[in-house]
Image: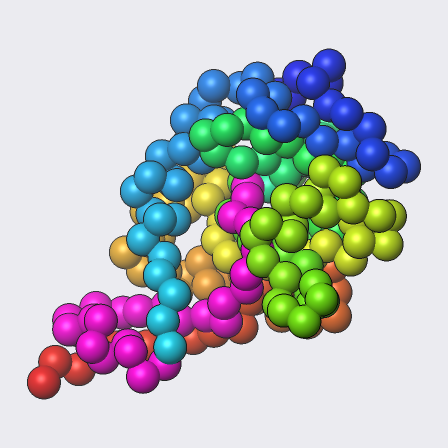
Amino acid sequence: MIDQSKLTPKHGSYAIASQRAVSDPQLMGIATEYETNFSRKMISLNPEQLEKRFTTTDLILETTKFDGEGVFVFFDQEQCFIFNAPSGRVRVGLPALLELQKHLQAQKIKKTLLRCELYYPFPIGNKRAGIGDVIRISFSGTLAEITALRLVILDIIMLDGKDLRPNRSDFGKTWSLLAELFGNDQNLPFFRAEGSIIVLLKR
């Protein structure tokens, strides 16, 4: 599933490969399609901008924004790793990932593909940490910084052989499942984002 020879050890069990480390073309294809057709449609807005930006009666999922790096997590009975699409950057052994792996095993989940945000919860200097800080920490951060990285779980793409992508038209099902499986305690290394499904009425 991943090319172990491309991994560079960092701290303890944590290692990273900069690119092209996912060896399963089907997995990469699913993740890349998701990035192209769904993930990039996520936008950042202030609450007062919602009605100006959306003029339909479609359901809208609004969540707390985390300034991190969009990643995928793949888990099965043999492995658990973070990767990016389409670059194929891979991270294994991240402390937050190891805790998520234990949780998935305890939930009796056999296989899943998740869309997450990897973020750093503390300020860097006098500013909020962002994607550049997450990438820097991933490659050259201290053990304390690596340990502090967290995973915000935003979507379930595959779960135990079921393709949940059709739930995009009724995202409430997946949103509820995320809460059931992961909760939203931001003190934990992984959690579902805070948010709600709303509808804006046409004027």
Does residue 139 appear anywhere in the picture?
A: yes
| Of the pair 140 and 184, the residue shown nearer to us | 140
Q: Residue at x 38, y 49 (%)?
A: 39
| Of the pair 100 and 33, the residue shown nearer to us | 33
Q: Is residue 178 left or right of residue 13?
A: left
- Residue reaching furthest to the left: 203
Quadrant of the snapshot with the N terminus = top right
Residue 139 place in picture, x, y as percent: 72, 38
- Residue reaching furthest to the top: 5
Residue 70 place in picture, x, y as percent: 52, 48
Q: Quadrant of residue 136?
A: top right
Q: Is residue 126 left or right of residue 170?
A: right
- Residue reaching furthest to the front: 126
Give the extent of the magenta segment. 47-72
Does residue 186 appear anywhere in the picture?
A: no
Q: Residue at x 61, y 21 (%)?
A: 21
Residue 84 place in picture, x, y as percent: 53, 36
| Of the pair 115 and 132, the residue shown nearer to us | 132
Magenta residue check for 53: yes
Against 69, is 4 above or below?
A: above
Residue 81 place in picture, x, y as percent: 67, 35
Q: Residue at x 15, y 73 (%)?
A: 55
Magenta residue check for 162: no
Q: Is residue 202 left or right of residue 181?
A: left
Quadrant of the snapshot with the C terminus = bottom left
Against 127, is 142 above or below?
A: above
Q: Residue at x 69, y 35 (%)?
A: 91
